[in-house]
Image (cartoon, rainbow, N blue to C red):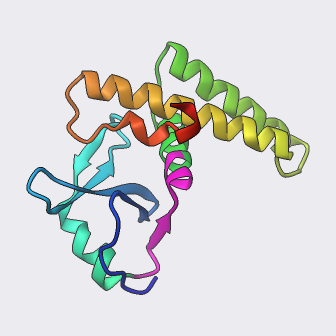
C-alpha cells in the first residue's frame, strides 16, 4: 500500500491480519483501535496510526466498512468461545463455509449474502454488548445500513 493522507473517518484497515479502525477522538485527533483477539473488544492502537496513514507497507490493507465487519466477525468467531445467540450465529456461518469447503467450491451468491448478513448482525450484537460494558471504541452503528434505519 502507498501512503494515504487522512481522509474521511472512520477508516478501516487490516494491519498484520488484524482489523484496525481509525476514528476521530474527543479532541478531533485520529485515534487507532485494534481488535483484541483475546476479548473481541478494542485496544487503543495509536502507535500504528502514522504507519498506516503515512508509511504503508505490504502488511497494511485498506478495507471497506463491509470488509472490516467481515474480517472482525471472522476473527471473533475464530478466536473466541462462548454460548448464546452470537456464538450460535458464528456456528451457522462456520457450517455454511465448511459445507462449501467440503464440496470444494466457492460460496454461492445466496450463501455469500447470508454469511455477510449474519456477520453484520453479529457485529451489531457484539458491539452493543461491548458498548454496554463500557468499551470506548464499540460502535454498533457501523453494522447498521442506512436502509436498516
Q: Nearer the viewer, residue 3 or 15?
A: 3
Instruction: Tell whether 89 sits left or right of 123.
Output: right
Instruction: Tell whether 149 sits left or right of 44.
Output: right
Q: How many marks?
A: 0
Instruction: Tell whether 9 sits left or right of 84.
Output: left
In which image quadrant can residue 12 be found? Answer: bottom left
Q: Report the residue at 33% width, 72% height from top.
A: 7
22 is higher (above) or lower (below) than 75: below
User: Residue 123: x, y in percent?
Assistant: 48, 34
Q: Nearer the viewer, residue 44 or 3?
A: 3
Indicate whether residue 147 is drawn in magenta: no
Q: Which residues are magenta?
A: 57-69
Q: Going by the picture, which residue comes out furthest to the left?
A: 27
Q: Report the residue at 26% width, 21% height from top.
A: 132
98 is higher (above) or lower (below) than 65: above
User: Residue 59: x, y in percent?
Assistant: 44, 73
Q: Report the residue at 34% width, 23% height from top.
A: 129
Q: Nearer the viewer, residue 35 or 24?
A: 24
In which image quadrant can residue 23 be found? Answer: bottom left
User: Residue 80: x, y in percent?
Assistant: 45, 31
User: Residue 100: x, y in percent?
Assistant: 84, 42
Q: Going by the picture, which residue comes out furthest to the right?
A: 103
Q: Report the residue at 74% width, 41% height from top.
A: 113
Instruction: Tell whether 63 sits left or right of 129.
Output: right
Amino acid at each position: 500500500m502507498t501512503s494515504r493522507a487522512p481522509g474521511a473517518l472512520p477508516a478501516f484497515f487490516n494491519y498484520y491480519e488484524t482489523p484496525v479502525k481509525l476514528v476521530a477522538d474527543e479532541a478531533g485527533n485520529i485515534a487507532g483501535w485494534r481488535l483484541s483477539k483475546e476479548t473481541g473488544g478494542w485496544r487503543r492502537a495509536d502507535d500504528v496510526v502514522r504507519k498506516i496513514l503515512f508509511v504503508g507497507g505490504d502488511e497494511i490493507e485498506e478495507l471497506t466498512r463491509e470488509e472490516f465487519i467481515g474480517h472482525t466477525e471472522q476473527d471473533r468467531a475464530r478466536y473466541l468461545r462462548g454460548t448464546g445467540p452470537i456464538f450460535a450465529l458464528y456456528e451457522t456461518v462456520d457450517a455454511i463455509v465448511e459445507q462449501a469447503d467440503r464440496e470444494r467450491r466457492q460460496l454461492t451468491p445466496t450463501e455469500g449474502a447470508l454469511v455477510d448478513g449474519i456477520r453484520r448482525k453479529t457485529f451489531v450484537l457484539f458491539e452493543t454488548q461491548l458498548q454496554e460494558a463500557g468499551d470506548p471504541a464499540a460502535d454498533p452503528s457501523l453494522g447498521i445500513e442506512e436502509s436498516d434505519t
